[in-house]
Amino acid sequence: MTGKFISFEGPDGAGKTTALNTIVADLKPQLKKQLIVTREPGGNRISEAIRDIILDRQNTEMDDRTEALLYAAARRQHIVETIEPALKANKLVLCDRYIDSSVAYQGAGREIGEQEVYQMNLFATAGLLPDLTIYFDVPSEIGLQRIMTHRTDEINRLDVEQLSFHKRVRASYLKLAKENPKRIKLVDATQSKGKVVSDVETIIRKTNSEFFNESGE
Ligand SMILES: Nc1ncnc2c1ncn2[C@@H]1O[C@H](COP(=O)(O)OP(=O)(O)OP(=O)(O)O)[C@@H](O)[C@H]1O
Ligand SMILES: Cc1cn([C@H]2C[C@H](O)[C@@H](COP(=O)(O)O)O2)c(=O)[nH]c1=O
């Protein structure tokens, strides 16, 4: 496959989606190749239906392993319908969350075990990993505060987990970043929105120069 696959990761409320919207608007005119922007869980009819089931706050009886399997199932369908065809067509794929979310949220947050969840996801992904992962690092308290203050209409079943759950998620992300320094680049997401965007754009430009017009404009 010849395209490039970049995932955006971070705890809830880290600001990934906000930054992604600005980054897409900024980078699109500067790119030589086509850009695909997508998200997990979701990105197609089946995966969006799975997303609705997972995130529905009424589904309080959902078992932790059921949850992990549903995320992996949504991921599989997303890879087959969206990510692989885009990479084969030499496109740049920007994806809001991917496999690291499962390791951090289900592996560490739900305490299923990070290795176990990673191994199960290897089956779902057939080993497809992002070329680059931007990790938006924010203390759990700040992320949750942002969500509770500004996004009360969209609070989902995972957002309402206890602070200890979210702290395990962040600790797991930090561990992943430390263990995979070539793939995962950490951005300080407590900075202003503008600074976060500019840090991310610098990383993307540096690591994917072949996708940009020579003038960079
Ligand atoms: N750098 C920032 N400083 C302050 N507030 C921010 C910053 N970035 C985003 N926000 C605000 O925080 C809230 C959450 O942002 P956003 O939805 O982009 O986070 P997210 O990482 O996509 O979260 P989730 O994964 O839970 O969907 C929004 O109200 C957004 O305006
Ligand atoms: C892919 C993936 C996601 N999650 C969690 C993380 C968030 O709490 C929600 C998705 O909501 P967002 O607003 O789109 O960020 O799902 C998870 O626990 N495991 C995963 O694999």
Image (spheres, rainbow, N blue to C red):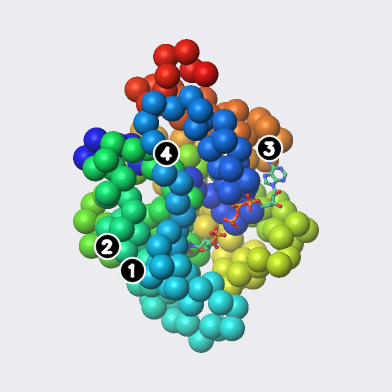
Of the numbered discs 2 and 3, the one sitting upstream in the chain is: 2
Q: Residue at x 44, y 73 (%)?
A: 49
The label shown at residue 35 is: 4
Q: What whole-number distance in Å separates the C-alpha atoms at marks 1 and 2?
A: 7 Å
- Looking at the image, residue 134 sits to the left or right of residue 144; the answer is left
Q: Residue at x 32, y 50 (%)?
A: 83
- Looking at the image, residue 32 sits to the left or right of residue 187; the answer is left
The label shown at residue 124 is: 2
Q: Residue at x 59, y 83 (%)?
A: 58
Disc 3 target residue: 193
Picture coordinates of residue 76, whole percent (x, y) = 30, 62
Of the numbered discs 1 and 3, the one sitting upstream in the chain is: 1
Q: Establish whether ligand 1 lies closer than 8 Å to the Cβ of label 3.
A: yes
Q: Residue at x 39, y 78 (%)?
A: 66
The label shown at residue 73 is: 1
- The answer to whether residue 138 is visible is no
Q: Which marked residue is nearer to the observer: mark 4 or mark 2?
A: 4
Q: Amino acid at mark 4?
A: Leu
Q: Amino acid at mark 2?
A: Ala
Q: Nearer the viewer, residue 211 or 164?
A: 211
- Looking at the image, residue 109 sits to the left or right of residue 139; the answer is left
Q: Establish whether ligand 1 lies closer than 8 Å to the Cβ of label 4.
A: no
- Residue 67: image quadrant is bottom left
Q: Is residue 49 above or below residue 78?
A: below
